[in-house]
Image: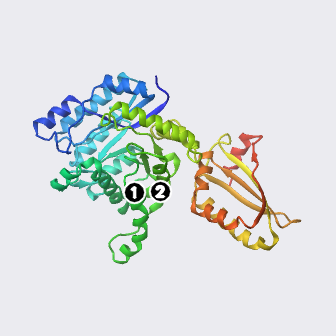
């Protein structure tokens, strides 16, 4: 039976949805046939693979009829209701009609108790990030909605190119990257920070696109092609599912633009054969156990992060985490006398940048012995082990580590245990 894994990327394909597409001659609009779907098979695979909960979203292409969208949402709500704990769902919207989409979002979230909203990267050429969608995002922001993205066929589309290289093999990644970067360039995610957006398929090309966008932004601004972009605020709202070609290398690449608490397991059921998905999940569990730098995040990726994302009643650890989750150390360092001044410059820089830039770094407080100046002590407090592991990968820490290796005569990192956690929590509420 279930082992606690939470799958944030699975699809519902109802008979009504299929019939509507067939009547419109759109069954092959995405370049490949829709897979067969039935609830019993989905539950059977979940039990075999150890999936406790799956999040259902409507597959591509987007239905033309608002009635089909409504019927699909109501069917997903029924499945969730009749199988408590096994299914959540993110409701589809009848875009490109923004007013109709807002009405459906309110109905789905308030009446059907949807767990979020599914948005296509584009519907009939209306791409995410378009100004006319701001009113919809305002409504979703007010309701603190989780948004699950999924790529759809680009519009316009080159049919010859699509025939040579099917959409799912490449263009879906481009389409996802296009939609997210559109939103970032207009600060949509920064202006509506209460929404949380799940990017599918291992972040698509974003680990490559984000550094390029950042480097070219000053040039574009000088030519008045883009305005100011709040990178930190935009990226903070993004989560990433690992459906598709996941691997340790892929996860490490994704961690260049996000943090471990924003990574989620996803299957893409039923678009991939169940036995392949089962093998892929087993392989993920294995490398999340075996890889030392990823092992601390195993439970987070497999279920905890998704649980924190979808369950508002379960508070996610943050910089104000309880003392029971904090990592507390007092680094005991002896520096060679000839390098003392240079070392202090490195230490002060990394401590300042870590506290300023990393929410999970609560305290890095360097001290120097008055009697023995080469004896350095650094009080280190991290919100969690995950925050500590993420800190070790930052550019500023790596600069400090590599730059001071030859300066340090001895180093000890004893972990401390708070004797009075209740009082420790009170300390961090003081100013």
Q: Which residue is at the far bottom? A: 222
Q: How crowded is mark 2: few (under 14 residues within 10 Å), some or many (20 or more)?
A: some
Q: Which of the 4 image quadrants contains residue 174? A: bottom left
Q: Label 2, secondary structure: give it.
A: loop
CA gap between label 1 and label 2 equals: 8 Å
x%, y% of residue 58?
Answer: 28, 37
Q: Indicate left or right for 102 with 68 as reference.
A: right
Q: Which of 29 and 225 is in front in this view?
A: 29
Considering the image in quadrants, where does the C terminus appear?
A: bottom right
* Label 1 vs 2, first from the N-terminus: 1
Q: Mark 2 points at which residue?
A: 257
x%, y% of residue 308?
Answer: 50, 39
Tag on residue 206?
Answer: 1
Kindly identify the residue that appears in the image at 32 percent across and 33 percent down. Answer: 273
Above or below, comparing residue 216 to residue 275 in the picture: below
Q: Indicate left or right for 166 with 311 as reference.
A: left
x%, y% of residue 178?
Answer: 31, 57
Q: Residues within 10 Å of mark 1 (few under 14, many from 20)?
A: many
Above or below, comparing residue 404 to residue 155 in the picture: below
* Residue 148 visible in the picture: yes
Q: Nearer the viewer, residue 9 or 208?
A: 208
Tag on residue 195?
Answer: none
Kindly identify the residue that appears in the image at 38 percent across and 34 percent down. Answer: 277
Q: Are marks 1 and 2 in contact (CB under 8 Å)?
A: yes
* Residue 157 visible in the picture: no
Q: Indicate left or right for 171 with 5 as reference.
A: left
Q: Nearer the viewer, residue 82 or 268?
A: 268
């Amino acid at each position: 039976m279930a082992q606690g894994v939470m799958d944030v990327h699975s699809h519902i394909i109802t008979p009504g949805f299929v019939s509507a597409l067939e009547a419109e001659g759109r069954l092959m609009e995405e370049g490949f046939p829709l897979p067969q779907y039935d609830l019993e098979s989905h539950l059977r695979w979940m039990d075999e693979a150890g999936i406790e909960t799956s999040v259902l979203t409507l597959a591509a292409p987007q239905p033309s009829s608002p009635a089909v969208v409504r019927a699909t949402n109501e069917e997903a709500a029924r499945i969730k209701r009749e199988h408590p704990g096994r299914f959540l769902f993110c409701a589809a919207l009848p875009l490109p009609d923004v007013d109709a989409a807002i009405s459906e979002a309110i109905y789905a979230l308030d009446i059907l108790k949807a767990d979020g909203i599914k948005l296509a990267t584009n519907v009939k050429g209306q791409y995410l990030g378009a100004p006319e969608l701001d009113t919809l995002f305002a409504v979703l922001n007010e309701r603190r909605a989780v948004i699950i993205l999924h790529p759809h066929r680009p519009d316009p589309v080159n049919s010859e190119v699509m025939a040579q290289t099917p959409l799912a093999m490449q263009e879906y990644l481009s389409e996802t990257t296009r939609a997210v970067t559109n939103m970032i360039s207009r600060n949509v995610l920064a202006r509506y920070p209460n929404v949380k957006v799940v990017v599918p398929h291992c972040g698509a090309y974003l680990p490559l696109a984000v550094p390029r966008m950042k480097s070219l932004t000053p040039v574009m601004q000088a030519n008045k092609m883009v305005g100011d972009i709040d990178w930190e605020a935009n990226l903070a709202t993004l989560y990433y599912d690992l459906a598709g070609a996941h691997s340790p290398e892929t996860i490490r690449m994704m961690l260049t633009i996000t943090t471990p608490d924003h990574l989620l397991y996803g299957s893409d059921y039923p678009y991939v054969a169940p036995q392949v998905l089962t093998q892929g999940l087993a392989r993920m569990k294995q490398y999340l156990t075996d890889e030392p730098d990823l092992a601390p995040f195993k439970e987070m990726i497999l279920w905890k992060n998704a649980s924190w994302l979808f369950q508002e009643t379960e508070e996610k650890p943050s910089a104000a985490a309880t003392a029971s989750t904090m990592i507390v150390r007092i680094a005991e360092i002896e520096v060679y006398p000839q390098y003392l001044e240079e070392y202090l410059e490195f230490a002060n820089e990394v401590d300042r940048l870590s506290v300023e830039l990393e929410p999970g770094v609560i305290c890095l407080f360097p001290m120097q012995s008055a009697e023995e100046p080469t004896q350095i002590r650094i009080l280190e407090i991290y919100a969690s082990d995950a925050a500590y592991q993420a800190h070790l990968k930052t550019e500023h820490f790596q600069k400090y580590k590599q730059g001071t290796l030859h300066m340090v005569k001895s180093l000890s990192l004893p972990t401390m245990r708070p004797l009075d956690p209740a009082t420790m929590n009170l300390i961090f509420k003081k100013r």
